[in-house]
Image: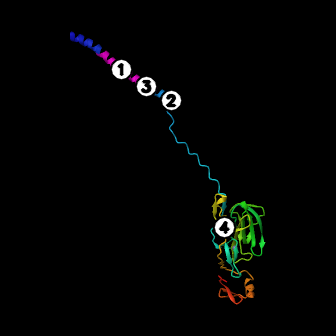
Amino acid sequence: MASRVLAATSSPYSLAAFAVVGGAIVVWGVANAVSAVGAMNAGLEKPAPAPVVAPAPTPAPPPPPPAFVFDAPLPGRVVNSPFGLRQMPWEENGRLHEGVDIAAPAGAPVHVATDGIVLRSGVSATYGRFVEVAHKDGFHTFYAHLGRDAGLKRGTFVKRGTTVAYVGDSGRSTGSHLHFELRNKAGKPLNPALFMGKTFAEKADLPLKAAARVPRTVRLAQVSKWPEGVKAKMAAQGASEVGGQVTRVKGGRVRARIMVVDG
Ligand SMILES: [Zn+2]
């Protein structure tokens, strides 16, 4: 009996105990659920701070365009007679070659070296057909011994690289080539080789002094063709040409012996 009572009594206790444990489990589970919802609510109310993203670097302002850009009038072609003192085979003394000669076949397009305005075009006995272009800061470029100009009228604005003429052999020329000059605002010739194909950020970077300097050395010119009439004139002056070598005699003294290519 006692055991039965015990059993009978123990049973509700154990049930109650079970219920308490179960309730605790339920409560624990509910608490967990509530805390989970709370966490979710908290997440909604207080959004997590946005991840720190490095601000996009502000692009550096593009560098200002260079103040001066000079192209070669015949890109890729070689200067075969530089700026400086030069003595032609038929001349008594050296004189300043005020530009550079660039050999090129007749008809090759001549590009204006830098932006400018066509100043004039015409024909001279010495330079043959020529075109002159004015540029900013008083620079002038001059293109000579041309076959023809490109027909651009005076005052036409020409961007660097524009075809202003075509190579030829006009005037007192020694074969098909371009005679190219660059002058400063005072009209003084500058050595174009110090500008061709070069870019200068500022005006102060221009090699104006160096380009105006004329070396003392007189270069004897090698020419592939003598201008018309020169040989006859030289013969009248007492010079003779033997086997490609010119001997100039003045007052009984040999003044010059000059090798002439294809004399
Ligand atoms: Zn020349």
Number of the label disc, if any, that sits on residue 211: 4
Q: Main secondary structure of the magenta part?
A: helix
Task: Identify the image quadrant of the C terminus.
Answer: bottom right
Say which residue appears at 23% left-offset and 11% top-offset.
4
Identify the element where label 3 is drawn: helix
Residue 181 in percent (x, y) is at 70, 69
Residue 35 among magenta residues = yes
Query: How many C-alpha atoms fall within 10 Å of the one at disc 1: few (<14), some, or many (≥20)?
Result: few
Q: Amino acid at mark 2?
A: Lys
Q: Which residues are magenta?
A: 14-38
Identify the element where label 1 is drawn: helix
Frontmost of labels 2 and 1 is 2
Q: Up-down: is 118 above or below 174?
A: above
Dot placed on the residue nearer the N-terminal end, 1 or 4: 1
Q: Amino acid at mark 3?
A: Ser
Mark 3 lies on residue: 35
